Structure formats: C-alpha cells, structure tokens
Image (tube, grey):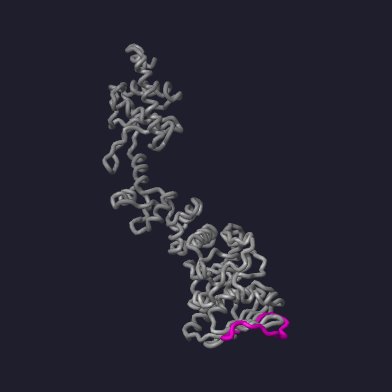
C-alpha cells in the first residue's frame, strides 16, 4: 500500500525541535556522515557566525533530495555505520539561519527565499556552510566536545585548524556481545552481536566518555574512554545511551578486566561497586574480586559482638556497616559471613569426644537400628561434649550425611535413658531428615514428616519384647 503524502512536515516545528540542541551534537551529525564515507580528510572550522565542514569523499550525495528530505537515506544499513534514519544532516541544517551544501555537481542553498539549487564544478567531496549567530560559550563548548572525537586511523580530522589525534590506546576487547541497532524491512530493531570495544587513556583534562565508533556520546563513570565499534541503542537525539546498556557495558568491562588488568585500588572504584550492587557479575568474577580486594579467608562482618568473636577465633573481618547494600548482597554469594564462621569454629573448638556410658551405648544401638530401617544405611554413632555457643545455644546433635556419622551432645536435651521420649525422638528424626536435605526448607519438612510417620508405624507394629530386643542389640 502506498503511503505517499500521508503527512507534511512543519518546517518551523522541525527547526524548534533541533535549534535547542547543543551545537556540538548537531555538528557531530555531519562529521559522522563523513566518517561513514571513504574519506581521508575532514575539516571543521567553527566561528561565531559561520561554520564550515568539508571532506574529500570520492562520492558526494547521489541525489539532491538526500540533503533536504527528512528520513530519506541511500546508505546500506549496517550496525557498523554511524548514521541512521536519514535525519542528522537535516536536523543540523534546520537549526541554522541559513546554509548551503556543496556536493559534486550541485549546491543546495537554504535561506530566506527557501530552498534552491545551482550547478557547480565540484568533482570531489562535500562542503557544508552553516550560518547562525552563536554565543562564545556555545562555540567553546562545541570545540571541547568535538576535540574528544577519536577519528578513524586512516582519517585526518581538523577542528578549527587543530589536528585531532587519537588518544593513547589502553586495550582492545574482542568479541564483546552487546546490543546494537539495525534497520530490517524499514523497522528499527535491537539485537545482540559481537563487536570490538576499544579502551583509551583520556587525554589530559578529558573526562572519560562513551563513544560510538569514535563519536563521543556522553560521560561514562569508568577510568577510560570506551569506544564501541557498532551502533549504540541511543535516546531520541542520540545524546545518551540507555541506562540498561551502560550497566551491561560496565559489567562486561569488569568481567573482562578483573583477572589481569585491575588492581586492588581500581577495584575499589565507584563504578565497580555499581556493577556489584546491580548483581550483574558472575560468581567467578566475584571470587576474583574478593581475592584481590580482601585478605585470604576474609569474612563478611555482622554485629560488633560477632565480629569480635570471629577475630578471637582467627578470622579476618571485613566491616559491612558502611558497605552499600547491593555490594553486600553480591559478596554474600562467595564470602562466608562472620556469624557462620563463628558457629563453625566454635563447633570445631568446643567439640570433645566422650567415651559412652552403658546407657549411651544402648541408646546408640536404638539409633543405629532406626538408621537401618528408615534410611537403609549403617550409621556411625558417637558422643561428644559441646559447650554452648556465643549465643548460649546448645547443639543437641549433628549429622554428616556424606559419611553417615551421627553425633550426640551429652549436655544436650537428648534423654539417653528414655530414647522413646517425644523430645529425644524429635531430635533423632530431625537429624535423620538431614540425610536427604541440608537446608531447613519445605523439602526437609516433608522428609521429617515421612520419617516420623514411618517410625511410628514401625514401632506401633512391634510388641514390647521386640522393642526391648533393639536395645539389647538383637
């Protein structure tokens, strides 16, 4: 279906939409168009009344309509082309008081009389003349912004007679999976593809920026200029990237650099904390972060009391009180909390083997019998003396499912003289349920209920003599 002449454009509305944009943003549109062509030189001369932009591209505009028809483009779309949508040059011209575009064979003038075209003898490249009164501060801001540009290696870029040289390269990152923008069947789409990301040392006095194939987009809170070699998903006037994209890019930088290129000081930067806090980093990279930033065996701190006890037990505590919540949540994935360390070490230090009494040996026969019947495995029963923890808690028993070892604390609540008491049976079944599940979750409860039910049915079907035989080892 033909949609010609559905709409008309308001020239004044188009002008208003673009006139308020920074001068540097408008000029970058023309420069990136030149970079997309086979140019060797691009020159920009910025004055308070007139601006000149000239390149030596072998081909100019194939048709004059490309200079003034909004959204019309003859570029074959590719994510490695900077220009898009056929808008940039028209936006630049619309924001001026008058302009002329001199291309091969013709010059298109924009002035008070409207638009008119005259023939010329130009044989190579394009020359754009822009006329608008600009404040000194706007010109200065444009010069600063355009001096950030990282020109392609084979292109000489001059801004007001000053040659712009690329900054010093820091590192190339290859095959980085990042989102980009393509046009498919006339529709703009976001897709992910591998690309190269170049990192540069900022020149003296420069703030690190995000770049799209050499064109600065916006400041980026990392230590380097980050130049992505494909289109970025940008906001409407292409003056900022999406927040999601910037976080993905920062996490990619951290993942790529943490193993060899970032020292402890670099890893304590705010941008690293931001990535950690958004939970956008792998467990492997987290482990490398912890190994580089904290001492070996470092613990995540808790309360002051827990931290003091952890230090007494030989732990190295990282104070978490001033740590951003997101960073703390990320580090919990790979670091042992001080509280868990204290519990573990106290169990190790406070546990002393006990030679069982005759009563305890008889009790052990009963528990072993339950293990045979309910778990189908032969348990190792032992007795220990464990002092209360720092919190005053007494551990009644512990079960090592891997080794089938069940330990009972002789100062706990287990009644060795009465194994069938509700409290004692509850402790036994609780520990046997850990044969299936370590955590105390809904699965644990299901196994505990099953064990208790099966044991009740088993004991209910036995007479007194049979039960007595259990305690005699029969």
Q: Looking at the picture, how far across and down is residue 140, in whole percent?
A: 50, 83
Q: Nearer the viewer, residue 328 or 318?
A: 328
Q: Looking at the picture, how far across and down is residue 169, in whole percent?
A: 58, 70
127 inside magenta stretch: yes
Q: Looking at the picture, how far across and down is residue 255, in whole percent?
A: 52, 57
- Work out whether 34 lies above or below 245: below
Residue 349, quarter of picture: top left
- Work out whether 359 lies above or below 119: above
- Work out whether 37 lies above or below 246: below
128 inside magenta stretch: yes
- Quadrant of the snapshot with the C terminus: top left
| Residue drawn at the location 29% of the way across and 41% of the way down | 389
47 with respect to 336 (left or right)? right
- Quadrant of the snapshot with the N terminus: bottom right
Q: Nearer the viewer, residue 95 or 49?
A: 95
| Residue drawn at the location 42% of the way across and 21% of the way down | 373
Q: Looking at the picture, how far across and down is residue 473, in whole percent?
A: 38, 17
Q: Nearer the viewer, residue 345 or 163?
A: 163
Q: Is residue 127 visible?
A: no
Q: Over which residues does the magenta segment extend?
A: 111-129
């Amino acid at each position: 279906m033909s949609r010609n002449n559905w709409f008309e454009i308001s020239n004044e509305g188009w002008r208003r939409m673009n006139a308020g944009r920074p001068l540097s943003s408008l000029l970058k549109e023309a420069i990136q168009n030149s970079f997309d062509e086979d140019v060797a030189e691009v020159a920009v001369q910025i004055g308070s009344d007139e601006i000149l932009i000239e390149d030596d591209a072998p081909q100019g505009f194939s048709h004059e309509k490309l200079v003034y028809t909004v959204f019309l483009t003859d570029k074959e779309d590719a994510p490695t082309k900077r220009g898009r949508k056929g808008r940039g040059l028209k936006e630049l011209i619309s924001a001026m008081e008058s302009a002329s575009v001199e291309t091969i064979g013709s010059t298109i003038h924009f002035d008070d009389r409207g638009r008119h075209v005259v023939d010329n003898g130009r044989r190579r490249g394009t020359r754009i003349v822009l006329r608008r009164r600009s404040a000194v501060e706007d010109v200065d801001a444009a010069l600063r912004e355009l001096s950030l540009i990282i020109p392609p290696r084979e292109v000489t870029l001059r801004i007001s007679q000053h040659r712009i040289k690329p900054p010093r390269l820091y590192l190339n990152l290859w095959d980085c999976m990042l989102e980009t923008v393509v046009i498919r069947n006339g529709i703009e789409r976001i897709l992910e593809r591998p690309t190269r990301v170049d990192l540069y040392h900022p020149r003296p006095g420069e703030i690190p920026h995000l770049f799209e194939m050499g064109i600065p987009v916006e400041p980026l809170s990392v230590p380097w200029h980050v130049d992505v070699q494909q289109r970025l998903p940008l906001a409407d006037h292409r003056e900022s990237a999406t927040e999601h994209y910037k976080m993905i890019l920062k996490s990619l930088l951290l993942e790529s650099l943490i193993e060899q290129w970032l020292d402890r000081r670099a890893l304590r930067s705010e941008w690293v904390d931001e990535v950690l806090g958004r939970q956008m980093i792998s467990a492997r990279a987290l482990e490398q972060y912890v190994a580089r930033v904290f001492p070996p065996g470092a613990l995540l701190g808790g309360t002051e009391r827990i931290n003091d006890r952890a230090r007494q037990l030989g732990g190295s505590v990282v104070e978490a009180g001033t740590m951003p919540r997101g960073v703390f949540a990320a580090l919990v994935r790979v670091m042992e909390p001080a509280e868990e360390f204290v519990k573990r070490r106290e169990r190790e230090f406070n546990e002393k083997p006990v030679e069982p009494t005759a009563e305890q040996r008889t009790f052990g026969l009963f528990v072993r019998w339950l293990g045979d019947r309910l778990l189908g495995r032969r348990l190792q029963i032992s007795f220990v003396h464990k002092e209360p923890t720092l919190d005053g808690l007494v551990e009644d028993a512990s079960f090592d499912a891997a080794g089938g070892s069940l330990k009972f604390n002789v100062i706990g609540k287990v009644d060795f003289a009465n194994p069938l008491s509700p409290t004692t049976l509850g402790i036994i079944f609780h520990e046997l349920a850990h044969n299936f599940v370590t955590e105390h979750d809904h699965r644990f409860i299901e196994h505990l209920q099953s064990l208790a039910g099966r044991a009740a049915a088993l004991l209910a079907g036995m007479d007194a003599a049979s039960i007595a035989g259990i305690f005699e080892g029969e």
